Image (cartoon, grey):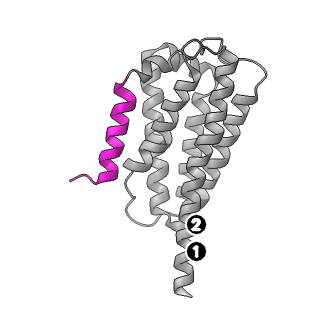
Amino acid sequence: MLSLPRLAGLGLLAGLWLSPLPGYAGGSMVLHMVLHLGVTAVVPALLAPRLPGPVGPVTLVLAAAAEMAVVWGWHLPGPHLWARLSETGFVLEQGSFLAAGCLLWAVVRGAGAFGGAVVLLATTMHMTLLGALIGLSPRDLYGGICAGHLGLSALEEQQVAGALMAGAGGALYLAAALHRLARALHLTEERA
């Protein structure tokens, strides 16, 4: 039987992928970012299982690096445009976002409170940095195809999307990291 969080994660994933959002996200950087954050951060936080056995520092670093490589790689202009203009690219992008997010959250859950918090803080930093780079870029990075649905220019869409990634994306991981740290500190106090 599936737990309530996993049912919610599956429901959210179905809503994200089966709604009109993917079609609109092809022409809107802002809507693309909403889809991206849902599939990379929120759904995996609800779906990912805890890995069996203890998770060591090497596994933590590899999972964090893999998630970062996937997210940054798909935001390079070439891969990003391929995912926007090709169904194959879109499916690969979305699948790799979901897989990398699930790997990250599974490792975080198996790492203990402090190790998991460190990985989430590192993810906060890279997500915030990438969002800032996208949002503060003085030029359109993606060839003008990311405008139209919201009445914004391509550069304005990119700026809003970057702010969403830096603000909302960073905040999601930061809140999870702080929650884990608070639990860890509480447990440490109880043991003392």
| Residue 124 inside the magenta-drawn segment | no
Residue 113's x, y, as percent?
A: 53, 67
Q: Label 2: state its secondary structure.
A: helix
Q: Which mark is residue 138?
A: none
| Nearer the observer, 10 or 51 | 10
Q: Is residue 7 above or below residue 96?
A: below
- Say whether residue 57 is visible: no
Q: Is residue 42 left or right of residue 144?
A: left
Q: Which residue is mark 2?
A: 181
Q: Is residue 126 left or right of residue 59?
A: right
Q: Label 1: state its secondary structure.
A: helix
Q: Residue at x 57, y 68 (%)?
A: 182
| Nearer the observer, 36 or 15 | 15
Which amino acid type is shown beneath numbered disc 1?
Leu
In the image, the segment drawn in magenta is: 1-19
Q: Which residue is mark 1?
A: 185
Q: Is residue 174 left or right of residue 37?
A: right
Q: Is residue 162 above or below residue 173?
A: above
